[in-house]
Amino acid sequence: MTTPLEPITFGERPLRIEDVLALANRQVPTRLQDDAAYRQRIAKGAQFLDSLLDKEGVIYGVTTGYGDSCVVPVPLEHVEALPRHLYTFHGCGLGKLLDAQATRAVLAARLQSLCHGVSGVRVELLERLHAFLENDVLPLIPEEGSVGASGDLTPLSYVAATLSGEREVLFRGERRPAADAHRELGWEPLVLRPKEALALMNGTAVMTGLACLAFARADYLLQLATRITALNVVALQGNPEHFDERLFAAKPHPGQMQVAAWLRKDLAIDAPTAPLHRLQ
């Protein structure tokens, strides 16, 4: 009988690379932190934004334009419409679509970032992003279009749009309009509030998610290369004692020590060995 896996919690505590990889591969259940104190802290961010709007405060990306247009005021009667204009304007990605694994990593990275509670978004937005992951509703995100240092604006605009019931998603193995997936799951598409589109888009969740996947591939290749080295030692009748732990403790470089440990394990150095034909 297998032991149920502990769910990964999105909330105050950070995620590890291993967590993002497990989420990308749908290997673990998830939950959203839901204690009253945490939900209140998230709500305070949205309430603070509302209080600034009530005072007609100048808020970047809410009552102003973006980038060089930050000096252009947005009248209060147009503030509610600005989020949709933002994700629509940036929906110009190109190239292949991110695969399902990469898209889940992106959603996990974006959700965890917003869970810190300093972006002015509602609890309902966190819940819907989490529901996308739980139900494997995956926005179709083109690979090309990020501007890097300013954030993954174009790729993440596809996340914002699909949360609002626009553009397309991969759902239950099919490419479908996001609105259809919402209807099938009994959801009302979100109407993003002031600042929420900017909070979703102006971040590095795409490059973060892809970097986690790249780390996993690099780690696999490192261990594969180490195993091939062990095979070469056997094939050439090399001296496995060259990987003795004491030699590497004298350096000491953590990476070399780890690789030497893998080699010792593969070569079973602690087991009796046949007489060596050569020392080097």
Image (cartoon, helix red, strand yellow):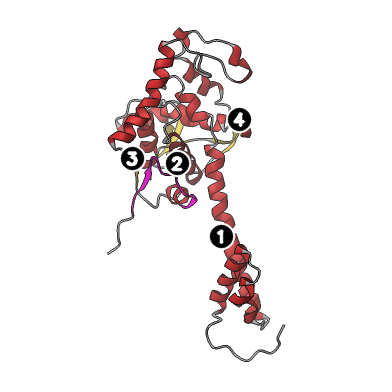
Instruction: Residue type at mark 2: give it.
Output: Ala
Give the residue pinned by disc 2: 108
Q: How crowded is mark 3: few (under 14 residues within 10 Å), some or many (20 or more)?
A: some
**Mark closer to the observer (3, 1):** 3
Q: In this view, does 244 lie to the left or right of 109?
A: right
Task: Specify which label sits upstream in the sequence, 4 or 1.
Answer: 4
Give the residue pinned by disc 4: 150
Q: Are marks 4 and 2 in contact (CB under 8 Å)?
A: no
Q: Do the residues labelled 4 and 3 touch (CB within 8 Å)?
A: no
Quarter-of-image position of residue 116: top left
What's the mark number on residue 220?
1
Tag 3 secondary structure: loop
Report, in whole angstroms, how far the alpha carbon at label 4 lies from the one at label 2.
Answer: 20 Å
What's the mark number on residue 33?
3
Residue 6 lies, with reference to residue 128, above or below; the image says: below
- Which percent across, then down, holds residue 155? 54, 33
Which residue is drawn at the image coordinates 45% and 7% (left, top)? Answer: 77
- Which percent across, then down, holds residue 186? 29, 30
Tag 4 secondary structure: helix
Task: Specify which label sits upstream in the sequence, 4 or 2.
Answer: 2
In which quadrant will I find the C terminus?
Answer: bottom right
**Mark closer to the observer (2, 3):** 3
Tag 1 secondary structure: helix
Tag 2 secondary structure: helix
Q: Residues within 10 Å of mark 4 (few under 14, many from 20)?
A: few
Report, in whole angstroms, how far the alpha carbon at label 2 lies from the one at label 3.
Answer: 14 Å
- Which percent across, then down, holds residue 124? 35, 29
Please give the range of residues in magenta. Answer: 6-18
Instruction: Residue type at mark 3: give it.
Output: Gln
Report, in whole angstroms, how far the alpha carbon at label 4 lies from the one at label 1.
Answer: 31 Å
Task: Specify which label sits upstream in the sequence, 3 or 1.
Answer: 3
Task: Specify which label sits upstream in the sequence, 2 or 3.
Answer: 3
